[in-house]
Image (cartoon, coloured by chain):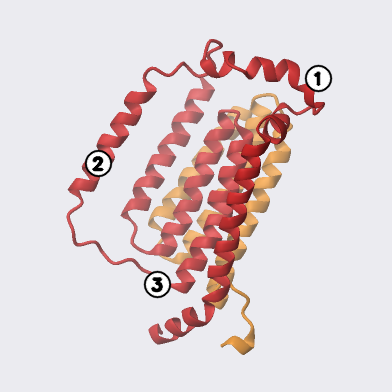
Chain colours: A red, B orange
């Protein structure tokens, strides 16, 4: 019961924040709202017991993204141009995509179902055998670092490349950005 | 008792969100976003105690650090108008 109330409150805050985010025009406000949005999503993940996912969401969404967005605003403009084109077609595309996604969740197993494919496929094997095979007490760590080691290596390479790219962009531009700022003021 | 705390926290979050949506000044919004981070820390801590797993407290502490990063970046943006290193020779 309490779980349902918590979920309903958090989800309504999430939807309200998303609606407010769409209506805003000042980019700075949008950055603040986006940070709050990912904090709310992280809280929902914590309620679902996915603490690691929640922490990633909060660190990337509320921490790093805020800094990157602010850096982008500092380098470019602070307001967005009001769109002149009618937004019925994009709205229609969004509604159809959302409806298809919701339709896709209909034949998913219930939350916490013991017969769900995720529970019966290899999860049992990992839970029982990973300590013997890998000798790491944390199952998630042994899956990420050993069973899926190459996958994790690829992810690390991608994240490293992205970080280098962002650092190059941010460290190159400030001179130009500042000149533009002076022209504005 | 923890349920009452959760409800009070939700009311506080709703009030902060109102300020975040309507807040006339930018500083209202910065404060609101910062407080919302604090509220997230409190929520995770209270949720841990509510579900009988007080070890969530450590995770809540990590969220306090993230909140700090965001606020410092925001304030630095307002003070220096940029996030790169503001060396005097570059101006």
Rendered residue at 17%/54% (across/down): A86
Q: Which residue is mark 2?
A: A93
Q: Are marks 3 and 2 on the same chain?
A: yes
Looking at the rendered structure, the secondary structure element under dot 1 is: helix
The span from disc 1 to disc 2 (Cα, nearest Å) is 50 Å
Where residue B12 appears, as percent x and y from the top left, is 52, 44
Position of residue A58 relative to residue A120, above or below, is below
Number of the label disc, if any, that sits on residue A132: 1
Looking at the rendered structure, the secondary structure element under dot 2 is: helix
Rendered residue at 21%/41% (across/down): A92
Tell me if B41 is positioned left or right of B31 in this view. Answer: right
Q: Chain of mark 3?
A: A
Foreground tag (3 vs 1): 1
Rendered residue at 70%/45% (across/down): B61
Upstream in the sequence, badge 3 or badge 1? 3
Dividing the picture into quadrants, the one containing residue B59 is top right
Where residue A11 appears, as percent x and y from the top left, is 44, 35
Position of residue B57 relative to residue A157, above or below, is above
Q: Which residue is mark 3?
A: A77
Q: Chain of mark 2?
A: A
Foreground tag (3 vs 2): 2
Q: Give the camera-side residue of A130 and B18.
A: A130
């Amino acid at each position: 019961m309490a779980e349902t109330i918590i979920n309903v409150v958090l989800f309504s805050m999430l939807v309200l924040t998303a609606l407010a985010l769409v209506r805003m025009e000042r980019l700075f406000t949008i950055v603040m709202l986006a940070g709050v949005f990912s904090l709310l999503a992280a809280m929902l993940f914590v309620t679902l017991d996915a603490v690691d996912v929640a922490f990633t969401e909060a660190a990337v969404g509320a921490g790093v993204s805020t800094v990157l967005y602010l850096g982008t605003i500092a380098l470019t403009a602070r307001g967005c141009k009001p769109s002149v084109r009618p937004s019925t077609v994009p709205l229609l595309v969004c509604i159809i995509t959302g409806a298809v996604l919701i339709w896709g969740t209909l034949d998913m197993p219930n939350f916490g179902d013991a017969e769900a494919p995720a529970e019966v496929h290899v999860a049992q094997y990992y839970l029982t055998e990973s300590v013997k095979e890998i000798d790491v007490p944390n199952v998630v760590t042994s899956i990420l670092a050993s069973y899926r080691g190459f996958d994790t290596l690829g992810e690390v390479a991608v994240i490293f490349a992205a970080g280098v790219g962002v650092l190059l962009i941010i460290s190159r531009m400030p001179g130009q950005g500042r000149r533009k700022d002076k022209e504005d003021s | 008792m923890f349920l009452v705390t959760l409800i009070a926290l939700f009311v506080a979050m709703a009030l902060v969100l109102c300020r975040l949506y309507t807040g006339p000044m930018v500083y209202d919004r910065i404060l609101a976003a910062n407080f919302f981070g604090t509220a997230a820390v409190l929520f995770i801590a209270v949720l841990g105690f509510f579900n009988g797993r007080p070890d969530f407290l450590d995770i809540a502490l990590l969220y306090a650090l993230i909140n700090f990063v965001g606020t410092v970046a925001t304030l630095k943006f307002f003070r220096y108008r940029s996030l790169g290193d503001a060396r005097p020779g570059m101006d």
